[in-house]
Amino acid sequence: MNLHGLTSKLETLELRSCLIQQQGSLVYEQYKDRHTAYEIFRINSCTKSILSALICIAMDQGKLPGPQTPASLFFPQLSRDKDERKQRITIGHLLTMSAGFRWNEFGGLNSFPQMTRSPDWAEYVLKQPLADEPGIRMEYNSGISQLLSAILVQATGIPTAQFAEQVLFGPLGITEYEWEADPQGIHTGGFGLKLMPADLLKFGQLYLQEGKWENTQVISSGLVASSALPALRSEPPRQGGYGWHWWTDTLPAGTGPERSEGMPYYYARGYAGQFVYVLPQLEVVVVLTRDNKRGRNNPAPDAFHEHIAPLLLASDRPKRA
C-alpha cells in the first residue's frame, strides 16, 4: 500500500491520531504527540457501535432475544401508552434508530440536551411522542442508545461496562477505559466512553474479521453481517445508510463493471472527528481521532474521504499491462 505523502496532508488537520491497518498489519501510524498513543480519549458517538457489539454478544449468549422482540418486554410502559404504535417498537428498531420517536438531537427540540438534564433519561425517551410508524424512517437519536444500554442491564443483570469487560474488552485486551453513566447508574449508550486509539483499532479489526479474535468467536459472523447491513437510508444531510448503530456507505471504486456500484464500507462515527472505518474488500481498518474543539457549525475536515480513501483505492486499482 502506497501511503506516500499522507503525513504532510494530515499534519494540517490537527488530528490526535491516524492508524491504518491492512490484513492485520499496521501500515500507518501518526499521533499528535508521543503521549497520545497511551491516553484514553472521548470517542463520543463511536460508543454506539461498541454498544451494538455488546447487544450482539448478549443475543449470541441467549441473554437477549432477537431483533424482532418488542421493546415493551423491557419497558412495559410502552404497552400502556395511549399511542398503540409504541407497542410495535422492537429491539431491531432501536438498533436502526427507526423507533419513530419525535426527536431532534441538537437544534429545534434539542432533545439530547433535554434528556441529559432530566432525572431519568430512559423515562424521558420513552415518554416522547411518535412522529413515524416504527421501522419507517431513521432519525438519529442518542436516547435510543440509552434505552439499549438499559435493556442490556436488564438482560445480563450486570452494568453495561462490566459486561463489556467480560465479553468484549477482555478478549481484545482492552484494559484502560472510562465510561460515563446516567443518574440511574446505567452507562451511557450513545456517548461517554474513553478508549485509546489502538484499542479502537482492535475493535474495528474484530469486525473486519467477522467477529473473530485470535481463536475466539467473540461475536457471531451472522450478527456482524447484520450490524453492517444498511437497514435504512440515513436522515439528511448525512449520506449512505444506517445498520445496527453503524453507518454504511460506498466509495467510488472505478468505472469497471465489477465496481459499478462502488465499494461498500461501514464505520463508527463520533462527534468532532472520531471514526473507525471498516473496509472489508480492502481488508483495511482506519481509525481517526481528533480533539473536540470544533462547534457544530465548524465541522472537522473529512480526512478519510479527502486524503486516505483515494490512496487506498489507488493501491487497490489493478496496474495496466
Image: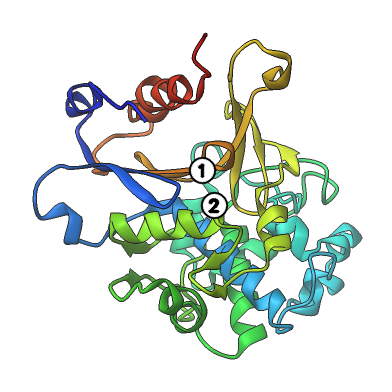
User: Quick one: SS at disc 2?
Assistant: helix
Residue found farthest to the bottom: 157
Whether the residues at callouts 1 and 2 have beta carbons within 8 Å, the answer is: yes
Residue found farthest to the front: 321
Q: Which residue is mark 2?
A: 208
Q: Quadrant of residue 95?
A: bottom right
Can residue 315 be seen in the rendering of this structure?
yes
**In-image side of 212 versus 257 (left or right):** left
Q: Residue at x 63, y 46 (%)?
A: 103
Kind of residue at badge 2: Leu
Residue found farthest to the right: 84
Picture coordinates of residue 300, whole percent (x, y): 33, 30
Q: Which residue is mark 1?
A: 283
Label 1 and label 2: CA atoms lie apart by 7 Å
Question: Alpha-carbon neighbours of circle 1 within 10 Å: few (<14), some, or many (≥20)?
Answer: some
**In-image side of 315 versus 317 (left or right):** left
Can residue 190 be seen in the rendering of this structure?
no
Q: Is residue 150 above or below residue 27?
A: below
Q: Nearer the viewer, residue 306 or 86?
A: 306
Labelled disc at residue 255:
none
Q: Residue at x 36, y 74 (%)?
A: 173
**In-image side of 173 versus 246 (left or right):** left
Q: Residue at x 59, y 82 (%)?
A: 153
Kind of residue at badge 1: Glu
Label located before the other in sequence (1 or 2): 2
Q: Is residue 163 above or below residue 137?
A: below
Q: Is residue 51 above or below residue 161?
A: above
User: Quick one: SS at disc 1?
Assistant: loop
Picture coordinates of residue 115, whole percent (x, y): 51, 59
